[in-house]
Amino acid sequence: MDRITHFLNSHLSEKRDKSKLSILDSPLLSYPDFKRLLGQEIKRSERYCEYLSLLIIDFSSLVKKSSLRPREKTEVTINMGERIKESIRETDFVCLLGSGRLALILAGTPREGAEYLASKLKEGLHPVLSPEILKEDDQIKTMVTSYPEEGNGKQNLLKFINFYLLLG
């Protein structure tokens, strides 16, 4: 079971529209690149006994409730991903998982470091989201898993990934 389950909204259209923001023009990973890189990072972590953390940032409930058009919802997510990419290490990667959901691959980062980054990113994203998206009762959710951890082997890491890829 060394696989990540495919999900329907795994990538955006291959057509380029220069007037609109596109994942193709962005520093974010595409879903196929995310799968490939994650597989490589898991193998590297196993081989060198190093940490690997995954951070899911989910503000999809905020995006879904907004009055934005589907394309605009994707653009908001890409913009958030690009802001995050600018504020993390070059060795970390950001992937678009769908409207309002991003995944970060944090190589060499233990759970504590990933949780700290999650709290900082969460704080930083709230003020940037537009009033059409951000409501008082809504929240940005962050989920973290790390490898290796006591009781959290590679299979648990893959289950975590599959669970969050299948949401939404």
Image (tube, grey):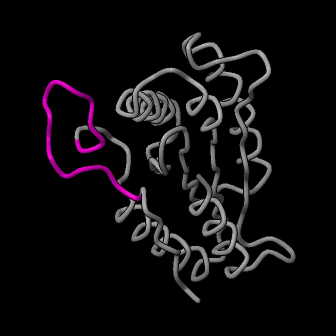
Q: In which quarter of the image is residue 53?
A: bottom right
Q: Is residue 88 shown left or right of residue 115?
A: left
In the image, residue 33 above or below residue 18 = below
Q: Which residue sits at x=63%, y=42%?
A: 57
Start and end of the magenta stretch? 10-24
Residue 16 magenta-highlighted = yes
- Which residue is the extreme one toward the right? 150
- Residue 109: where, in percent of width, then height? 66, 55
- Residue 71: where, in percent of width, then height? 35, 32
Residue 28 magenta-highlighted = no
In the image, residue 132 above or below residue 82 = above
Q: Which residue sits at x=77%, y=55%?
A: 111
Q: Report the predominant secondary structure element of the magenta stretch.
A: loop
- Which residue is the extreme one toward the bottom? 1
Q: Which residue sits at x=80%, y=49%?
A: 112
Q: Which residue sits at x=51%, y=33%?
A: 84
In the image, residue 28 above or below residue 125 = below
The number of callouts visible is 0
Is 143 in front, or is 111?
143
- Residue 139: where, in percent of width, then height? 74, 29
Q: Is residue 121 shown left or right of residue 3?
A: right
- The N terminus is located in which quarter? bottom right
- Residue 36: where, in percent of width, then height? 39, 71
